């Protein structure tokens, strides 16, 4: 595969990119320790869609810490910005972890828009896209409890990373603690099933061919039926554990699953010059002053 180097940002960019018509990603949680930004950066470097839908929880404002914003997280922001400038239509749909952006619903500038939901018509079929936290009763009535759960989830991801490090040292494979918990706890399984059935039921009532969500970090592509009809339920998963996206190409939706082997052999990712690493506020301000040439470098 051919690659070229862009000196401006010290990063590798794929020339032979895949070009699906639509890509949907969600639940990236930039600004948290569990975010797999490097892998997402590799993926974004390998594709050029006509439409990119950011379906909520891209930036985790709930757990945002100004002391933690690595270069890899800034790289994602830069790559999405480059897509906008390159003519890709980008829709940012708000989620619960980036709910502050709901103040800007209706905002449009160039190829970027911010909304709470999106309806696309693809090959004559209607796609209803939203994050999905609107169905979460916990979010409506006990937000503090939901935030506490988010912190616990992030801690579990960190613990999982440490366990996987030791596991690989001893020659064993990776495991996902949160997946095991989700799959073994009946209430978690019931919640996911109820979420999917609720989304599909409303979509069937509204006559949508596809309903597309995020929020529950559970990638899916399946037909759901009831006595009123049927629809295709899709979920883009997340970029913490599953590393998945939805791609629409040649009239079909497919779940993309990140595979490290795709990107082995060449280094598709490198730190961007605009990355902030672990700089503190004063360092960031000093960089800003230098950028505006107010002081000699």
Image (tube, rainbow, N blue to C red):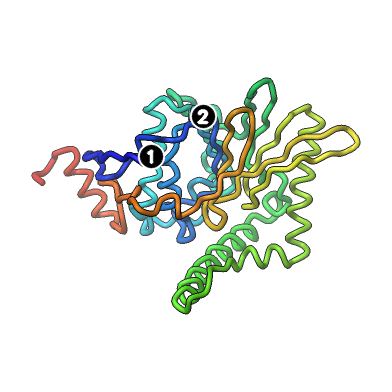
In-image side of 187 versus 81 (left or right):
right
Q: Residue lying farthest left?
A: 296
Residue 52, percent from left and from top: 51, 33
Res. 142 visible in picture: yes
Dot 2 alpha-carbon crowd within 10 angstroms: few under 14, some 14 to 19, many 20 or more? many
Q: Look at 57% across and 40% down and name the residue there.
A: 55
Res. 44 image quadrant: top left
Above or below 176: residue 248: above
Query: What residue would you read off at disc 1?
Result: 79
User: Image quadrant for the N terminus?
Assistant: top left
Secondary structure of residue under mark 2: strand
Q: Look at 60% across and 44% down and name the residue there.
A: 255
Q: Residue lying farthest bottom?
A: 170
Q: Which mark is residue 18?
A: none
Q: How many marks?
A: 2
Judging depth in this view, the residue of 174 and 192 nearest the camera is 174
In-image side of 138 versus 19 (left or right):
right
Residue 211, percent from left and from top: 70, 36
Judging depth in this view, the residue of 78 and 61 nearest the camera is 78
**What is the distance, in whole Å, between disc 1 and disc 2 at their CAs?**
14 Å
Secondary structure of residue under mark 1: helix
Residue 69, percent from left and from top: 37, 54
Above or below 70: residue 274: above
Res. 103 visible in picture: no
Judging depth in this view, the residue of 84 and 5 nearest the camera is 5
Res. 117 image quadrant: top right
Dot 1 alpha-carbon crowd within 10 angstroms: few under 14, some 14 to 19, many 20 or more? some
Nearest to N terminus: mark 1 or mark 2:
2
Q: Look at 52% across and 71% down and name the residue there.
A: 159
Residue 73, percent from left and from top: 39, 50
Query: What residue would you read off at disc 2?
Result: 51
In-image side of 191 versus 35 (left or right):
right
């Amino acid at each position: 595969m051919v690659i070229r180097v862009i000196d401006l940002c010290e990063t590798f960019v794929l020339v032979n990119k895949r070009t699906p018509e639509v890509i949907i990603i969600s639940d990236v949680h930039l600004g948290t320790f569990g975010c797999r930004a490097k892998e997402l950066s590799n993926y974004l470097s390998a594709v050029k869609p006509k439409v990119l839908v950011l379906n909520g929880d891209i930036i985790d404002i709930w757990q945002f810490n100004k002391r933690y914003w690595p270069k890899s997280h800034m790289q994602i922001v830069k790559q999405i910005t480059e897509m906008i400038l390159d003519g890709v239509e980008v829709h940012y749909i708000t989620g619960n972890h980036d709910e502050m952006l709901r103040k800007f619903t209706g905002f449009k500038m160039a190829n970027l828009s911010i909304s709470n939901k999106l309806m696309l018509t693809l090959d004559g079929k209607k796609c209803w896209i939203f994050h999905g936290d609107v169905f979460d009763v916990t979010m409506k009535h006990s937000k503090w409890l939901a935030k506490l759960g988010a912190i616990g989830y992030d801690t579990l991801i960190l613990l999982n990373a440490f366990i996987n490090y030791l596991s690989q040292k001893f020659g064993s494979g990776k495991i996902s603690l949160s997946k095991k918990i989700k799959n073994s706890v009946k209430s978690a399984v019931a919640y996911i099933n109820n979420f999917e059935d609720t989304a599909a039921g409303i979509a069937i009532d509204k006559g949508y061919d596809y309903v597309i969500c995020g929020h529950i970090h559970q990638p899916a592509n399946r037909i759901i039926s009831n006595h009123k009809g049927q629809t295709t339920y899709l979920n883009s998963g997340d970029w913490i554990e599953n590393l998945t996206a939805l791609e629409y190409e040649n009239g079909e939706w497919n779940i993309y699953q990140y595979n490290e082997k795709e990107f082995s052999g060449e280094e598709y990712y490198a730190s961007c010059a605009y990355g902030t690493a672990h700089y503190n506020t004063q360092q960031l301000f000093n960089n800003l002053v230098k950028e505006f040439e107010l002081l000699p470098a």
